[in-house]
Image: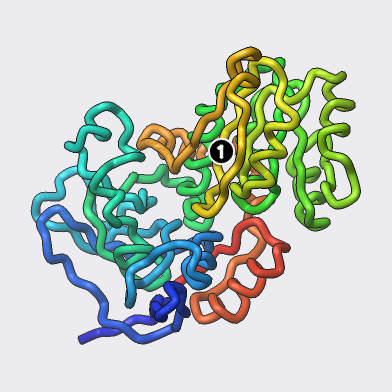
Amino acid sequence: MEKMLAAVFHENESGGGEVKLEEVVIPIIMKNDQILIEVKACGICGTDLKIIEGGHPANDNTIIGHEFGGVIKEIGKDVKDLEIGDNVVIDPNEKCGYCINCRRGFSNLCDFMALGTTFGIFQNGGFAKYCIIPKSAAFKLPDNIDMNAAALIEPLSCAVHCHNIANVRESDNVVIIGAGPMGLIIESVIRKHPIKNLICVELNDWRREKAMDLGADFVINPNSQNVKKEIMRITNENGADVIIDAVGLSETFEMGLSMWAPGARLVCFGQDYRAEAKIKPNDIVRYQRKILGSYIGYAEDFLDAIELINNKVIEIEKLITKIIPLNQLITTGFHLMKERKCVKIIVNP
């Protein structure tokens, strides 16, 4: 049986674990609606590190990596709309299509998916040479999209979804709290929309510089500046119309509550199940404000993300910090992520 190198998660008793590079058997198609892809590129996500640290669940002995694309090598006999040789990007969150949430148009809240179906977390994913997926997870790519750029489509689709949830308008002052990889990708999407001001709040020096490079009008360091005062100064005492919390901690949520304008939308994007915060309902009612959640995305967000790259709307070269082979995933890739001096690290298996 042929084997391939893969990054396999091994859970420990505390719920976290470690990722090891191992030789595993190349998978084969077992169902008629499946395809075998040769993975060409897979991005490292902050979730991959959270899995190791115990901050996100994952199945033991699973190949991680959920931001990936590749070329089709084999297809099941029921696959009619894809062909061998097609370049595809993968929506890693497998949905059922028939639960009440799917049928009401909230496929990102699929009951089946909530049980644990994500490729690269609960099912084998993209940090390997080959991967088996159902045809429903594959989006065919235009010929001119580079596969390293394709690895950005999944996180970009989440950013598109967040942008749409926020209902960004031309007259808005927009604040993004947290300029980590996802905060910066969200910034890249919002920056293409004509708005009044785009402001990033970030502790890390490298990330603040990157936020400016990607088009932020202002950056604020909460360690040395009073965030609320700075936001009020920049917005002529009006406050922020859209606040996106790309961190998800109690303190970042409450920071958002401190700066919102009448009619503002506070979008919770970053996740930490331990976070708790107090709110004053009257502050929402009296000033007609909204608190919204943005979770992954819909199929149309994937299509929009593909077109943002296909039409060169997003500056991909500014989002890809480094491209590495799979054998450097742990030594180089995870190390750079922990240093917080990168946007996206792309792995070529």
What is the total number of numbered labels drawn onto the structure image? 1
| Residue 49 drawn above or below residue 152 | below
**Front residue (pair 55, 169):** 55
**Residue 185 in the image: x percent, y percent?**
61, 45
- The structure residue drawn at horizontal position 35% and vertical position 53%, both measured from the top left corner, is 92
Residue receiving disc 1: 268
The reply, left or right, for residue 102 in relation to residue 164 is left
The reply, left or right, for residue 83 in relation to residue 55 is left
**Residue 234 in the image: x percent, y percent?**
86, 27
Residue 348 visible to an observer of this rendering: no
- The structure residue drawn at horizontal position 42% and vertical position 77%, both measured from the top left corner, is 7
Question: Which quadrant, please, contains the N terminus?
Answer: bottom left
**Front residue (pair 177, 153):** 177
Q: Amino acid at mark 1?
A: Cys
Choose top left, top right, bottom left or bottom right for residue 277. Answer: top right
**Front residue (pair 86, 127):** 127
Mark 1 Cα shell of 10 Å, populated few (<14), some (14-19), many (≥20): many
Question: Which quadrant, please, contains the C terminus?
Answer: bottom left
| Residue 320 drawn above or below residue 214 | below
| Residue 192 drawn above or below residue 186 | above
**Residue 254 in the image: x percent, y percent?**
68, 39
**Residue 233 in the image: x percent, y percent?**
89, 26
**Front residue (pair 154, 177):** 177
Q: Label 1, secondary structure: give it.
A: strand
Residue 277 visible to an observer of this rendering: yes
- The structure residue drawn at horizontal position 63% and vertical position 13%, both measured from the top left corner, is 286
